[in-house]
Image (tube, rainbow, N blue to C red):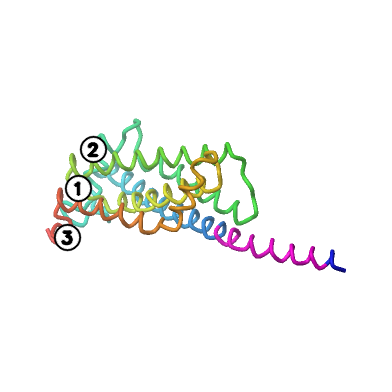
């Protein structure tokens, strides 16, 4: 009787312990889907705008708000086709990955360590490319592309959420676990801080708020 009671207590304890982890996994999965969908939508619209520009160089694009807030100049520049084809095509393919991973996690899938490392490497590459595009947009082209900004906005938290999740789960080994556990609750403030840095740099290089009316 006592043994059965102990087993029941252990089962209840395990259930309670696993609940927060399952909840966090669910939230992470939904975030991957939402972030991936937003990024894909931005890339899709940029692709449509690129096609419109190819058909008519003088086409009025929906993202052209003012002389400074626009995507036409970005799409026409060499920075808009770094690898020999329009950058938005990278987004159309790349943002499918977090959507697929998020859906798989919701379905109960469990991935191997090598998969999480590869997934993380891909997101690090995306963040590095986004940082480069931000610097090119602000310091070289002197414009703010609205759809590009949406891509930036989802890539930054994708990097932090995925990297800290993997660190906490021991994907990178035991040493980074503590950092992952320490910083995971701060993902939102860290992301907001990154946004503020981008906004400040953009406001210094381009008077964004004023340019909306120019």
Q: Earlier in the sequence, mark 3 or mark 1?
A: 1
Q: Which quadrant of the figure contains the C terminus?
A: bottom left
Q: Is residue 15 left or right of residue 128?
A: right
What is the distance, in whole Å, between disc 2 and disc 3 at their CAs?
24 Å
Q: Nearer the viewer, residue 86 or 60?
A: 86
Q: Judging from the image, what secondary structure is the residue with disc 3 in?
A: helix
**Residue 156 in view, yes or no:** yes
Q: Residue furthest top?
A: 84
Residue bearing the label numbered 1: 143
Q: Is the residue marked by circle 2 packed among few (<14), some (14-19), or many (20+) residues within 10 Å?
A: few
Query: Residue shown at 31%/35% (left/top)?
Result: 81
Cβ atoms at labels 3 and 1 below 8 Å apart? no
Compared with residue 37, is residue 47 higher up or lower down, i.e. above or below?
A: above
Question: In this figure, what is the number of numbered marks?
Answer: 3
Residue 203 image point, x, y percent: 17, 53
Which-is-in-front pick, marks 2 and 3?
A: 3
- The single residue placed furthest to the right in the displayed view is 1
Q: Which residue is mark 3?
A: 209
Q: In terms of secondary structure, where does tag 1 sit?
A: loop
Name the residue carrying label 2: 77
Instruction: Report how far apart the C-alphas of labels 1 and 2 lie in the structure.
Output: 12 Å
- Which residues are drawn in magenta? 5-24
Residue 142 in the image: state x and y as whole percent: 17, 45
Q: Quadrant of residue 11?
A: bottom right
Along the line of sight, the residue nearer the viewer: 113 or 169: 169
> Which of the two labelled residues, at mark 2 and mark 3, occupies the earlier sequence position?
2
Please tell me which residue is depicted at 69% across the width and 61% down the height of the picture. 14
Quadrant where the N terminus lies? bottom right
Coordinates of residue 135 in the picture (x, y in percent) = 24, 41
């Amino acid at each position: 009787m006592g043994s059965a009671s102990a087993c029941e207590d252990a089962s209840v304890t395990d259930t309670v312990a696993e609940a927060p982890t399952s909840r966090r996994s669910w939230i992470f999965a939904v975030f991957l889907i939402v972030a991936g969908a937003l990024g894909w939508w931005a890339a899709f619209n940029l692709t449509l705008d690129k096609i419109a520009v190819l058909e008519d160089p003088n086409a009025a694009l929906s993202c052209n708000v003012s002389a400074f807030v626009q995507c036409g100049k970005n799409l026409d520049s060499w920075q808009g086709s770094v690898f020999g084809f329009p950058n938005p095509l990278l987004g159309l393919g790349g943002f499918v990955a977090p959507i697929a991973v998020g859906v798989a996690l919701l379905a109960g899938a469990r991935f191997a360590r090598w998969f999480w490392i590869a997934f993380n490497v891909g997101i690090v590459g995306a963040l590095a490319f986004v940082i480069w595009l931000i610097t090119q947009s602000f310091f070289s082209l002197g414009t703010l592309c609205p759809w590009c900004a949406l891509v930036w906005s989802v890539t930054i938290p994708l990097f932090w959420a995925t990297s800290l999740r993997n660190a906490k789960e021991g994907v990178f080994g035991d040493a980074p676990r503590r950092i992952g556990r320490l910083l995971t609750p701060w993902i939102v403030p860290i992301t907001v801080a990154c946004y503020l840095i981008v906004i400040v740099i953009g406001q210094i290089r381009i008077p964004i708020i004023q340019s909306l009316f120019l």
